[in-house]
Protein backbone atom coordinates (compact mmCIF):
# COMPACT_ATOMS: atom_id res chain seq x y z
CA UNK A 1 0.00 0.00 0.00
CA UNK A 2 1.26 3.52 -0.78
CA UNK A 3 2.02 6.19 1.80
CA UNK A 4 -1.49 7.54 1.43
CA UNK A 5 -3.98 6.52 4.05
CA UNK A 6 -7.70 6.13 3.79
CA UNK A 7 -9.55 9.23 5.02
CA UNK A 8 -11.16 9.04 8.41
CA UNK A 9 -14.83 9.75 8.87
CA UNK A 10 -15.97 12.01 11.66
CA UNK A 11 -19.46 11.24 12.90
CA UNK A 12 -21.47 13.40 15.24
CA UNK A 13 -24.48 12.12 17.10
CA UNK A 14 -26.91 14.80 18.14
CA UNK A 15 -30.52 15.68 18.86
CA UNK A 16 -32.25 18.34 16.78
CA UNK A 17 -34.79 20.35 18.74
CA UNK A 18 -37.11 23.17 17.79
CA UNK A 19 -39.01 25.03 20.49
CA UNK A 20 -38.20 22.28 22.93
CA UNK A 21 -39.43 19.51 20.66
CA UNK A 22 -37.22 16.89 19.06
CA UNK A 23 -37.09 16.54 15.29
CA UNK A 24 -38.54 13.09 14.72
CA UNK A 25 -38.46 10.57 11.89
CA UNK A 26 -41.65 8.55 11.68
CA UNK A 27 -41.97 5.13 10.04
CA UNK A 28 -38.76 5.71 8.08
CA UNK A 29 -40.71 7.07 5.12
CA UNK A 30 -43.11 9.74 6.36
CA UNK A 31 -42.41 13.41 6.72
CA UNK A 32 -40.93 14.57 9.96
CA UNK A 33 -42.75 16.55 12.61
CA UNK A 34 -41.47 17.91 15.89
CA UNK A 35 -42.27 15.70 18.83
CA UNK A 36 -41.35 15.20 22.43
CA UNK A 37 -39.63 11.90 21.72
CA UNK A 38 -36.25 12.29 23.46
CA UNK A 39 -34.50 9.43 21.69
CA UNK A 40 -34.72 10.75 18.13
CA UNK A 41 -30.99 10.94 17.58
CA UNK A 42 -29.40 12.06 14.34
CA UNK A 43 -25.92 11.73 12.90
CA UNK A 44 -24.14 13.91 10.41
CA UNK A 45 -21.62 12.66 7.88
CA UNK A 46 -19.40 14.85 5.78
CA UNK A 47 -20.41 14.78 2.13
CA UNK A 48 -18.94 16.35 -0.99
CA UNK A 49 -20.80 19.64 -0.65
CA UNK A 50 -22.21 19.53 2.84
CA UNK A 51 -23.46 17.03 5.37
CA UNK A 52 -25.81 14.08 5.29
CA UNK A 53 -28.14 13.89 8.22
CA UNK A 54 -29.43 10.44 9.12
CA UNK A 55 -31.90 9.44 11.81
CA UNK A 56 -30.17 7.11 14.23
CA UNK A 57 -33.13 4.82 14.86
CA UNK A 58 -34.79 4.55 11.46
CA UNK A 59 -31.98 5.04 8.97
CA UNK A 60 -33.98 7.77 7.26
CA UNK A 61 -32.32 10.82 5.73
CA UNK A 62 -33.44 14.42 5.56
CA UNK A 63 -34.38 15.05 1.94
CA UNK A 64 -36.04 17.82 -0.02
CA UNK A 65 -38.95 16.66 -2.14
CA UNK A 66 -41.23 19.15 -3.89
CA UNK A 67 -40.12 21.90 -1.54
CA UNK A 68 -41.05 19.80 1.48
CA UNK A 69 -38.52 18.45 3.91
CA UNK A 70 -39.03 14.81 4.67
CA UNK A 71 -37.20 11.67 5.64
CA UNK A 72 -36.76 8.79 3.26
CA UNK A 73 -34.67 5.68 2.80
CA UNK A 74 -32.53 6.78 -0.12
CA UNK A 75 -29.25 8.51 -0.84
CA UNK A 76 -29.01 11.45 1.55
CA UNK A 77 -29.48 14.99 0.46
CA UNK A 78 -26.55 17.16 1.44
CA UNK A 79 -27.23 19.93 3.89
CA UNK A 80 -25.15 22.79 5.19
CA UNK A 81 -25.32 23.34 8.91
CA UNK A 82 -25.13 27.06 9.62
CA UNK A 83 -24.23 27.68 13.24
CA UNK A 84 -25.81 30.61 15.01
CA UNK A 85 -24.51 30.47 18.55
CA UNK A 86 -26.18 27.53 20.23
CA UNK A 87 -28.66 27.15 17.38
CA UNK A 88 -28.29 26.10 13.77
CA UNK A 89 -29.99 26.47 10.43
CA UNK A 90 -30.11 23.60 7.99
CA UNK A 91 -29.69 24.67 4.39
CA UNK A 92 -30.13 22.56 1.30
CA UNK A 93 -29.90 23.79 -2.29
CA UNK A 94 -29.87 27.41 -1.07
CA UNK A 95 -33.07 26.79 0.84
CA UNK A 96 -33.56 26.71 4.55
CA UNK A 97 -35.47 24.31 6.70
CA UNK A 98 -37.89 25.89 9.11
CA UNK A 99 -41.03 25.05 11.01
CA UNK A 100 -44.38 26.37 9.87
CA UNK A 101 -45.85 26.60 13.33
CA UNK A 102 -49.44 26.92 12.21
CA UNK A 103 -49.33 23.74 10.14
CA UNK A 104 -47.02 21.82 12.44
CA UNK A 105 -44.99 20.44 9.57
CA UNK A 106 -41.52 20.87 8.17
CA UNK A 107 -41.07 22.74 4.94
CA UNK A 108 -38.32 24.51 3.04
CA UNK A 109 -38.25 28.23 2.59
CA UNK A 110 -36.11 30.51 0.42
CA UNK A 111 -36.17 33.13 3.14
CA UNK A 112 -34.32 33.31 6.40
CA UNK A 113 -36.89 32.93 9.11
CA UNK A 114 -36.49 33.07 12.85
CA UNK A 115 -38.39 29.82 13.05
CA UNK A 116 -35.64 28.08 11.12
CA UNK A 117 -33.41 27.93 14.19
CA UNK A 118 -32.83 24.51 15.69
CA UNK A 119 -30.89 23.58 18.78
CA UNK A 120 -28.34 20.79 18.51
CA UNK A 121 -27.62 18.76 21.61
CA UNK A 122 -24.66 16.45 21.07
CA UNK A 123 -24.77 13.01 22.67
CA UNK A 124 -22.31 10.17 22.75
CA UNK A 125 -24.65 7.27 22.04
CA UNK A 126 -28.33 6.34 21.95
CA UNK A 127 -30.07 5.98 25.28
CA UNK A 128 -30.87 2.32 25.87
CA UNK A 129 -33.51 1.03 28.25
CA UNK A 130 -32.50 -2.60 28.14
CA UNK A 131 -33.94 -5.44 30.12
CA UNK A 132 -37.54 -4.26 30.19
CA UNK A 133 -38.86 -6.83 27.71
CA UNK A 134 -37.85 -10.01 25.98
CA UNK A 135 -35.09 -9.26 23.50
CA UNK A 136 -37.14 -10.00 20.38
CA UNK A 137 -39.86 -7.62 21.61
CA UNK A 138 -37.50 -4.93 22.85
CA UNK A 139 -36.74 -1.51 21.37
CA UNK A 140 -33.12 -2.58 21.29
CA UNK A 141 -33.89 -5.50 18.98
CA UNK A 142 -35.71 -3.09 16.67
CA UNK A 143 -32.75 -0.75 16.93
CA UNK A 144 -30.36 -3.53 15.92
CA UNK A 145 -32.62 -4.50 13.02
CA UNK A 146 -32.67 -0.86 11.91
CA UNK A 147 -28.90 -0.65 12.10
CA UNK A 148 -28.56 -3.78 9.99
CA UNK A 149 -31.15 -2.43 7.57
CA UNK A 150 -29.16 0.80 7.34
CA UNK A 151 -25.99 -1.21 6.78
CA UNK A 152 -27.48 -3.12 3.87
CA UNK A 153 -28.97 0.08 2.47
CA UNK A 154 -25.56 1.73 2.65
CA UNK A 155 -24.01 -1.27 0.89
CA UNK A 156 -26.63 -0.99 -1.80
CA UNK A 157 -25.84 2.69 -2.19
CA UNK A 158 -22.14 1.86 -2.45
CA UNK A 159 -22.93 -0.55 -5.26
CA UNK A 160 -24.87 2.09 -7.17
CA UNK A 161 -22.18 4.69 -6.52
CA UNK A 162 -19.48 2.38 -7.82
CA UNK A 163 -21.41 1.23 -10.85
CA UNK A 164 -22.39 4.80 -11.83
CA UNK A 165 -19.80 5.30 -14.60
CA UNK A 166 -21.00 4.19 -17.99
CA UNK A 167 -19.20 1.03 -18.96
CA UNK A 168 -18.76 2.40 -22.48
CA UNK A 169 -16.60 5.29 -21.27
CA UNK A 170 -12.82 5.08 -21.48
CA UNK A 171 -11.12 3.75 -18.41
CA UNK A 172 -9.58 7.14 -17.59
CA UNK A 173 -12.97 8.84 -17.67
CA UNK A 174 -14.48 6.11 -15.56
CA UNK A 175 -11.69 6.50 -13.02
CA UNK A 176 -12.36 10.24 -12.80
CA UNK A 177 -16.03 9.58 -12.18
CA UNK A 178 -15.12 7.06 -9.53
CA UNK A 179 -12.86 9.55 -7.81
CA UNK A 180 -15.73 12.03 -7.75
CA UNK A 181 -17.72 9.45 -5.81
CA UNK A 182 -14.95 8.37 -3.47
CA UNK A 183 -15.90 10.73 -0.66
CA UNK A 184 -19.53 9.71 -0.90
CA UNK A 185 -18.58 6.05 -0.95
CA UNK A 186 -16.18 6.49 1.97
CA UNK A 187 -18.87 8.03 4.14
CA UNK A 188 -21.48 5.44 3.20
CA UNK A 189 -19.07 2.60 3.87
CA UNK A 190 -18.18 4.17 7.19
CA UNK A 191 -21.84 4.62 7.97
CA UNK A 192 -22.51 0.95 7.28
CA UNK A 193 -19.61 -0.08 9.49
CA UNK A 194 -20.69 2.24 12.27
CA UNK A 195 -24.26 0.97 12.15
CA UNK A 196 -22.99 -2.56 12.60
CA UNK A 197 -20.82 -1.41 15.48
CA UNK A 198 -23.79 0.33 17.07
CA UNK A 199 -25.83 -2.83 16.63
CA UNK A 200 -23.05 -4.85 18.24
CA UNK A 201 -22.82 -2.41 21.15
CA UNK A 202 -26.59 -2.52 21.57
CA UNK A 203 -26.58 -6.30 21.85
CA UNK A 204 -23.61 -6.13 24.22
CA UNK A 205 -25.42 -3.63 26.45
CA UNK A 206 -28.54 -5.75 26.42
CA UNK A 207 -26.52 -8.84 27.25
CA UNK A 208 -24.86 -7.16 30.23
CA UNK A 209 -28.17 -6.05 31.72
CA UNK A 210 -29.85 -9.41 31.13
CA UNK A 211 -26.89 -11.20 32.71
CA UNK A 212 -27.11 -9.02 35.82
CA UNK A 213 -30.88 -9.39 35.94
CA UNK A 214 -30.67 -13.17 35.63
CA UNK A 215 -28.09 -13.39 38.41
CA UNK A 216 -30.29 -11.22 40.62
CA UNK A 217 -33.28 -13.48 40.00
CA UNK A 218 -31.47 -16.63 41.06
CA UNK A 219 -29.37 -15.08 43.79
CA UNK A 220 -29.81 -16.79 47.13
CA UNK A 221 -30.69 -14.53 50.08
CA UNK A 222 -27.76 -13.95 52.35
CA UNK A 223 -25.20 -15.14 49.83
CA UNK A 224 -22.89 -13.17 47.63
CA UNK A 225 -23.56 -13.15 43.94
CA UNK A 226 -21.44 -15.51 41.93
CA UNK A 227 -18.61 -13.94 40.02
CA UNK A 228 -19.53 -15.85 36.90
CA UNK A 229 -22.88 -15.84 35.18
CA UNK A 230 -22.68 -19.59 34.64
CA UNK A 231 -23.06 -20.22 38.38
CA UNK A 232 -26.35 -20.08 40.24
CA UNK A 233 -25.90 -19.95 44.02
CA UNK A 234 -29.66 -19.99 44.62
CA UNK A 235 -30.09 -23.19 42.67
CA UNK A 236 -27.13 -24.85 44.33
CA UNK A 237 -28.38 -23.96 47.81
CA UNK A 238 -31.88 -25.23 47.03
CA UNK A 239 -30.55 -28.48 45.57
CA UNK A 240 -28.30 -29.03 48.61
CA UNK A 241 -31.15 -28.36 51.02
CA UNK A 242 -33.43 -30.64 49.02
CA UNK A 243 -30.87 -33.46 49.15
CA UNK A 244 -30.41 -33.05 52.90
CA UNK A 245 -34.14 -32.98 53.51
CA UNK A 246 -34.57 -36.02 51.29
CA UNK A 247 -32.11 -37.93 53.48
CA UNK A 248 -33.91 -36.77 56.63
CA UNK A 249 -37.28 -37.75 55.21
CA UNK A 250 -36.00 -41.21 54.28
CA UNK A 251 -34.84 -41.64 57.88
CA UNK A 252 -38.20 -40.38 59.17
CA UNK A 253 -40.11 -42.82 57.00
CA UNK A 254 -37.93 -45.69 58.30
CA UNK A 255 -38.56 -44.59 61.88
CA UNK A 256 -42.26 -44.27 61.13
CA UNK A 257 -42.34 -47.81 59.77
CA UNK A 258 -40.53 -49.11 62.85
CA UNK A 259 -42.87 -47.18 65.10
CA UNK A 260 -45.87 -48.71 63.39
CA UNK A 261 -44.40 -52.13 64.28
CA UNK A 262 -44.01 -51.02 67.90
CA UNK A 263 -47.60 -49.82 67.91
CA UNK A 264 -48.75 -53.23 66.71
CA UNK A 265 -46.79 -54.93 69.52
CA UNK A 266 -48.14 -52.47 72.09
CA UNK A 267 -51.68 -52.97 70.84
CA UNK A 268 -51.28 -56.78 71.06
CA UNK A 269 -49.87 -56.51 74.59
CA UNK A 270 -52.66 -54.21 75.65
CA UNK A 271 -55.35 -56.43 74.17
CA UNK A 272 -53.81 -59.47 75.93
CA UNK A 273 -53.72 -57.71 79.30
CA UNK A 274 -57.19 -56.37 78.69
CA UNK A 275 -58.45 -59.94 78.24
CA UNK A 276 -56.63 -61.02 81.41
CA UNK A 277 -58.26 -58.17 83.22
CA UNK A 278 -61.69 -58.99 81.83
CA UNK A 279 -61.26 -62.66 82.86
CA UNK A 280 -60.06 -61.65 86.32
CA UNK A 281 -62.96 -59.22 86.63
CA UNK A 282 -65.40 -61.99 85.67
CA UNK A 283 -63.81 -64.37 88.23
CA UNK A 284 -63.97 -61.68 90.89
CA UNK A 285 -67.60 -61.00 90.11
CA UNK A 286 -68.32 -64.75 90.37
CA UNK A 287 -66.52 -65.04 93.74
CA UNK A 288 -68.25 -61.93 95.02
CA UNK A 289 -71.59 -63.48 93.99
CA UNK A 290 -70.73 -66.64 95.95
CA UNK A 291 -69.79 -64.56 98.95
CA UNK A 292 -73.02 -62.56 98.74
CA UNK A 293 -74.97 -65.80 98.49
CA UNK A 294 -73.21 -67.14 101.62
CA UNK A 295 -74.20 -64.08 103.53
CA UNK A 296 -77.80 -64.74 102.65
CA UNK A 297 -77.77 -68.29 104.02
CA UNK A 298 -79.74 -68.37 107.35
CA UNK A 299 -77.62 -71.15 108.87
CA UNK A 300 -74.53 -68.95 108.66
CA UNK A 301 -73.84 -66.49 111.35
CA UNK A 302 -72.47 -63.16 110.34
CA UNK A 303 -69.05 -63.92 111.72
CA UNK A 304 -68.98 -67.19 109.81
CA UNK A 305 -69.50 -65.27 106.64
CA UNK A 306 -66.56 -63.05 107.40
CA UNK A 307 -63.73 -62.69 105.04
CA UNK A 308 -61.84 -65.30 106.87
CA UNK A 309 -64.23 -67.91 105.60
CA UNK A 310 -63.37 -69.97 102.60
CA UNK A 311 -65.83 -68.13 100.36
CA UNK A 312 -64.53 -64.78 101.56
CA UNK A 313 -60.96 -65.82 100.96
CA UNK A 314 -61.78 -66.92 97.41
CA UNK A 315 -63.39 -63.58 96.69
CA UNK A 316 -60.46 -61.64 98.09
CA UNK A 317 -58.04 -63.72 96.03
CA UNK A 318 -60.02 -63.04 92.87
CA UNK A 319 -60.19 -59.37 93.75
CA UNK A 320 -56.43 -59.21 94.14
CA UNK A 321 -56.02 -61.04 90.86
CA UNK A 322 -58.34 -58.55 89.16
CA UNK A 323 -56.45 -55.61 90.64
CA UNK A 324 -53.17 -57.04 89.38
CA UNK A 325 -54.62 -57.58 85.91
CA UNK A 326 -56.03 -54.04 85.94
CA UNK A 327 -52.64 -52.62 86.84
CA UNK A 328 -50.98 -54.51 84.00
CA UNK A 329 -53.75 -53.46 81.62
CA UNK A 330 -53.30 -49.81 82.61
CA UNK A 331 -49.53 -50.16 82.22
CA UNK A 332 -49.96 -51.56 78.69
CA UNK A 333 -52.45 -48.77 77.96
CA UNK A 334 -49.85 -46.24 79.04
CA UNK A 335 -47.27 -47.88 76.76
CA UNK A 336 -49.74 -47.87 73.88
CA UNK A 337 -50.59 -44.20 74.46
CA UNK A 338 -46.90 -43.27 74.47
CA UNK A 339 -46.21 -45.23 71.29
CA UNK A 340 -49.26 -43.70 69.62
CA UNK A 341 -48.08 -40.23 70.66
CA UNK A 342 -44.67 -40.92 69.14
CA UNK A 343 -46.37 -42.24 66.02
CA UNK A 344 -48.40 -39.04 65.72
CA UNK A 345 -45.24 -36.97 66.15
CA UNK A 346 -43.49 -38.93 63.40
CA UNK A 347 -46.52 -38.66 61.12
CA UNK A 348 -46.66 -34.89 61.66
CA UNK A 349 -42.92 -34.64 61.01
CA UNK A 350 -43.25 -36.70 57.84
CA UNK A 351 -46.15 -34.54 56.64
CA UNK A 352 -44.10 -31.37 57.20
CA UNK A 353 -41.16 -32.89 55.36
CA UNK A 354 -43.39 -33.78 52.42
CA UNK A 355 -44.58 -30.16 52.27
CA UNK A 356 -41.02 -28.83 52.59
CA UNK A 357 -39.78 -31.21 49.91
CA UNK A 358 -42.57 -30.13 47.55
CA UNK A 359 -41.69 -26.48 48.17
CA UNK A 360 -37.99 -27.09 47.65
CA UNK A 361 -38.68 -29.08 44.49
CA UNK A 362 -40.73 -26.13 43.21
CA UNK A 363 -37.87 -23.76 44.15
CA UNK A 364 -35.35 -25.96 42.36
CA UNK A 365 -37.62 -26.21 39.33
CA UNK A 366 -38.03 -22.44 39.26
CA UNK A 367 -34.32 -21.84 39.74
CA UNK A 368 -33.51 -24.32 36.98
CA UNK A 369 -36.07 -22.65 34.74
CA UNK A 370 -34.49 -19.26 35.38
CA UNK A 371 -31.05 -20.70 34.82
CA UNK A 372 -32.01 -22.57 31.66
CA UNK A 373 -33.94 -19.58 30.33
CA UNK A 374 -31.07 -17.27 31.17
CA UNK A 375 -28.55 -19.61 29.57
CA UNK A 376 -30.70 -19.85 26.45
CA UNK A 377 -31.02 -16.07 26.29
CA UNK A 378 -27.31 -15.64 26.84
CA UNK A 379 -26.57 -18.05 24.00
CA UNK A 380 -28.88 -16.07 21.73
CA UNK A 381 -27.26 -12.78 22.70
CA UNK A 382 -23.76 -14.18 22.42
CA UNK A 383 -24.49 -15.65 19.00
CA UNK A 384 -26.08 -12.40 17.85
CA UNK A 385 -23.21 -10.38 19.24
CA UNK A 386 -20.65 -12.67 17.62
CA UNK A 387 -22.44 -12.45 14.27
CA UNK A 388 -22.52 -8.66 14.42
CA UNK A 389 -18.86 -8.55 15.44
CA UNK A 390 -17.97 -10.78 12.48
CA UNK A 391 -20.03 -8.65 10.10
CA UNK A 392 -18.43 -5.49 11.45
CA UNK A 393 -14.96 -6.87 10.85
CA UNK A 394 -15.87 -8.02 7.35
CA UNK A 395 -17.39 -4.67 6.46
CA UNK A 396 -14.49 -2.73 7.91
CA UNK A 397 -11.99 -4.78 5.90
CA UNK A 398 -14.16 -4.53 2.81
CA UNK A 399 -14.35 -0.75 3.10
CA UNK A 400 -10.62 -0.39 3.59
CA UNK A 401 -9.89 -2.59 0.58
CA UNK A 402 -12.33 -0.67 -1.60
CA UNK A 403 -10.89 2.69 -0.56
CA UNK A 404 -7.37 1.49 -1.29
CA UNK A 405 -8.43 0.00 -4.61
CA UNK A 406 -10.52 2.89 -5.90
CA UNK A 407 -8.89 5.95 -4.36
CA UNK A 408 -5.26 4.97 -4.56
CA UNK A 409 -5.37 2.29 -7.25
CA UNK A 410 -3.25 0.06 -5.05
CA UNK A 411 -2.90 -3.62 -5.78
CA UNK A 412 -5.07 -3.78 -8.87
CA UNK A 413 -6.73 -7.12 -9.41
CA UNK A 414 -5.20 -8.72 -6.31
CA UNK A 415 -6.63 -6.04 -4.06
CA UNK A 416 -10.00 -6.26 -5.78
CA UNK A 417 -9.99 -10.01 -5.28
CA UNK A 418 -9.83 -9.37 -1.54
CA UNK A 419 -12.69 -6.89 -1.89
CA UNK A 420 -14.76 -9.45 -3.72
CA UNK A 421 -14.16 -12.09 -1.04
CA UNK A 422 -15.01 -9.67 1.75
CA UNK A 423 -18.24 -8.62 0.06
CA UNK A 424 -19.06 -12.24 -0.61
CA UNK A 425 -18.45 -13.15 3.01
CA UNK A 426 -20.49 -10.21 4.22
CA UNK A 427 -23.48 -11.00 2.00
CA UNK A 428 -23.36 -14.69 2.91
CA UNK A 429 -23.13 -13.85 6.61
CA UNK A 430 -26.10 -11.52 6.32
CA UNK A 431 -28.11 -14.19 4.56
CA UNK A 432 -27.53 -16.68 7.39
CA UNK A 433 -28.75 -14.40 10.18
CA UNK A 434 -32.44 -14.53 11.06
CA UNK A 435 -32.50 -10.81 11.84
CA UNK A 436 -30.77 -9.96 8.59
CA UNK A 437 -32.89 -11.87 6.07
CA UNK A 438 -35.53 -9.18 5.68
CA UNK A 439 -33.22 -6.16 5.19
CA UNK A 440 -31.06 -8.20 2.84
CA UNK A 441 -33.94 -8.26 0.36
CA UNK A 442 -33.14 -4.69 -0.68
CA UNK A 443 -29.57 -5.58 -1.59
CA UNK A 444 -29.28 -5.40 -5.35
CA UNK A 445 -27.42 -8.62 -6.11
CA UNK A 446 -27.61 -8.04 -9.87
CA UNK A 447 -25.89 -4.69 -9.45
CA UNK A 448 -23.36 -6.30 -7.15
CA UNK A 449 -22.61 -9.02 -9.70
CA UNK A 450 -22.33 -6.38 -12.42
CA UNK A 451 -20.00 -4.35 -10.25
CA UNK A 452 -17.71 -7.31 -9.72
CA UNK A 453 -17.09 -7.62 -13.45
CA UNK A 454 -16.37 -3.93 -13.98
CA UNK A 455 -14.12 -2.72 -11.17
CA UNK A 456 -11.02 -4.55 -12.47
CA UNK A 457 -11.27 -2.61 -15.71
CA UNK A 458 -11.04 0.62 -13.75
CA UNK A 459 -8.23 -0.50 -11.47
CA UNK A 460 -6.25 -2.20 -14.18
CA UNK A 461 -6.69 -5.65 -12.70
CA UNK A 462 -7.90 -8.77 -14.40
CA UNK A 463 -11.65 -9.57 -14.45
CA UNK A 464 -12.73 -11.13 -11.19
CA UNK A 465 -16.01 -12.63 -12.31
CA UNK A 466 -19.34 -12.51 -10.58
CA UNK A 467 -19.92 -12.80 -6.90
CA UNK A 468 -21.41 -16.22 -6.28
CA UNK A 469 -22.74 -17.87 -3.14
Image: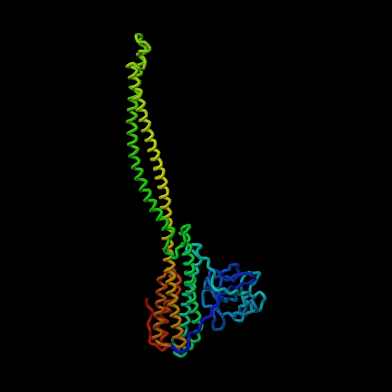
Name the residue rendered at 41%, 75% in the picture: 427
Report whether 62 appears left or right of 468.
right
The colour scheme used to paint the residues is rainbow
User: Residue 222: x, y in percent?
Assistant: 48, 58
Residue found at the very far right of the displayed protein: 114
What x and y, as percent, mark residue 104?
A: 63, 69
Pick the residue in front: 296 or 414. Answer: 296
Expressed as whole percent of the image width and height from the top left, the position of residue 24 reads 58, 70
Whether residue 375 sits left or right of residue 17 in the image: it is left
Examine the rendered structure and indicate whether residue 444 appears above or below residue 413: above
In the drawing, does residue 246 fall left or right of residue 53? Answer: left
Would residue 256 appear left or right of 218 to someone viewing this image?
Answer: left
Quadrant in which the C terminus appears? bottom left
Q: Answer whether residue 201 is visible to the viewer in this image.
A: yes
The quarter of the picture where residue 327 lies is top left
Residue 318, given in percent of the width and then of the height, sits at 33, 22
Residue 286 in sight from this viewpoint: no
Amino acid sequence: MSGNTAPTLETKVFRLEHSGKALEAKDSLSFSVPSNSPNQLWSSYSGVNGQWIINRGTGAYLVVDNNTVGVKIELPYEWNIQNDGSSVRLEAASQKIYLQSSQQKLAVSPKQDADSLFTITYVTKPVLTVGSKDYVESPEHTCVANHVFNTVNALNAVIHILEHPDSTLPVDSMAVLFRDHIKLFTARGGEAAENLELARQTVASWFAVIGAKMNAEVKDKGTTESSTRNENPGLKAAEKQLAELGTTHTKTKAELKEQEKKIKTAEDNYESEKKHYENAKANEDLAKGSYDDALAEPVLELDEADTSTFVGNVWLAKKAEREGAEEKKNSRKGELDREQGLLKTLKDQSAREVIDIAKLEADVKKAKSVTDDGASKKRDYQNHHQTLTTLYGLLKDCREHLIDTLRYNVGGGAKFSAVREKLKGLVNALEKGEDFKEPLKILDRAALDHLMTRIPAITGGSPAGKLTN
